[in-house]
Amino acid sequence: MRALLALVGISLQLACSEPYAARGGSGGPPPAPASTQAPDPAAEPPTAEPPASVVDDPKAGDVHYVELVLGGAAADATLPMVVAIHGLGDDPRNFGHLFESFSSPVRLILPRGLESREAGGYSWFPLRARDPDVAALAQGIAQAADRLAVAIDTLARTRPTAGKPIVTGFSQGGMLSFAIAVRHPESISLALPIGGWLPPPLWPTVAAGAKAPHIVAFHGTDDGAVKFEPTERAVDELRKHGWPVELHAYPGVGHVITPEIHRDLDDALDDGVRAIAKAKPRP
């Protein structure tokens, strides 16, 4: 599985209108852009079967999503749920390639951004992390996080789900992973933001509850789109309020998912799935 994971990590650079760094985690060339075009029919077929699609483009609340079952599980099996949120300019199916190598049986939910973009793909909120209007950015993140939380609660209730869902995401999806964990801690068991940030207006003002979800963040120190230092300050603030939070820093890495980040994300997901399996069943 590690060999396949490394291959996917090297070849995958998620579609996002934010600029990417010119180097990967080891200082080598950047990952190649991921294609969202249909495959060439003359090309050789893939050697591995793609994940089985259970439902394609339905809605939970007012959020469209794609549902996949990984790990060879049956579509109607009771499984841990992983909600993976794409970044600006990306789409659910393209982002889903990141999880092709994940071998544990899970139900993968890939929500679609709330607004389509003329340049292609989807967006969750109108402003970027670099926008000086932090209050408006925070408002957009909060509104999208609240809508996503409704969708997550609906899916966890209506799909055969073991434990509370795990949420992860890149760039805008990383910001939403932070925000869902803080604003809707009862909805998830674990948040895994990648290249994300929680703006100060969304920082908690009260102590975390006993059931606050664990947050494990992954961030390149040379990220030019979502700066590392503000994320570091947000994590410190969460710690002050008792949140169980970790920040994994990747020196020299920009706004990109390198093979090292991909590997660490895979390990964190696996730990989260194992924890769900050990917990008592949902009532």
Image (cartoon, grey):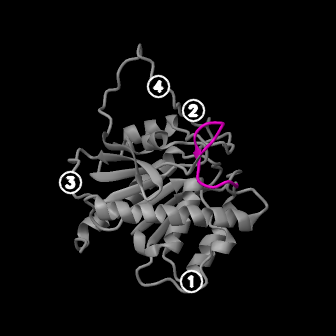
Expressed as whole percent of the image width and height from the top left, the position of residue 263 reads: 44, 50
Which numbered disc, 3 or 1, marks the residue that appears first in the sequence?
A: 3
Q: Choose between 56 and 203: the one closer to the eye.
A: 56
Q: Are marks 4 and 3 in contact (CB under 8 Å)?
A: no
Q: For mark 2, give the secondary structure.
A: loop
Which numbered disc, 3 or 2, marks the residue that appears first in the sequence?
A: 2
Return the residue at label 2.
32
Return the residue at label 4.
38
User: Label 2 vs label 4: CA separation?
Assistant: 17 Å
Report the amino acid beneath label 3: Ala
Return the residue at label 1.
241
Q: For mark 4, give the secondary structure.
A: loop
Q: For mark 3, give the secondary structure.
A: loop
Which numbered disc, 1 or 4, marks the residue that appears first in the sequence?
A: 4
User: Label 3 vs label 1: CA separation?
Assistant: 38 Å
User: Label 3 vs label 2: CA separation?
Assistant: 36 Å
Q: Choose between 267 and 279: the one closer to the eye.
A: 279
Q: The N terminus is located in which quarter?
A: top left
Expressed as whole percent of the image width and height from the top left, the position of residue 113 reads: 54, 50
Please indicate whether residue 56 sits to the left or right of residue 257 in the image.
left
Magenta span contains residue 156:
no
Which numbered disc, 4 or 3, marks the residue that appears first in the sequence?
A: 4
Return the residue at label 3.
77
Which numbered disc, 2 or 4, marks the residue that appears first in the sequence?
A: 2
Residue 44 visible in the displayed image: yes
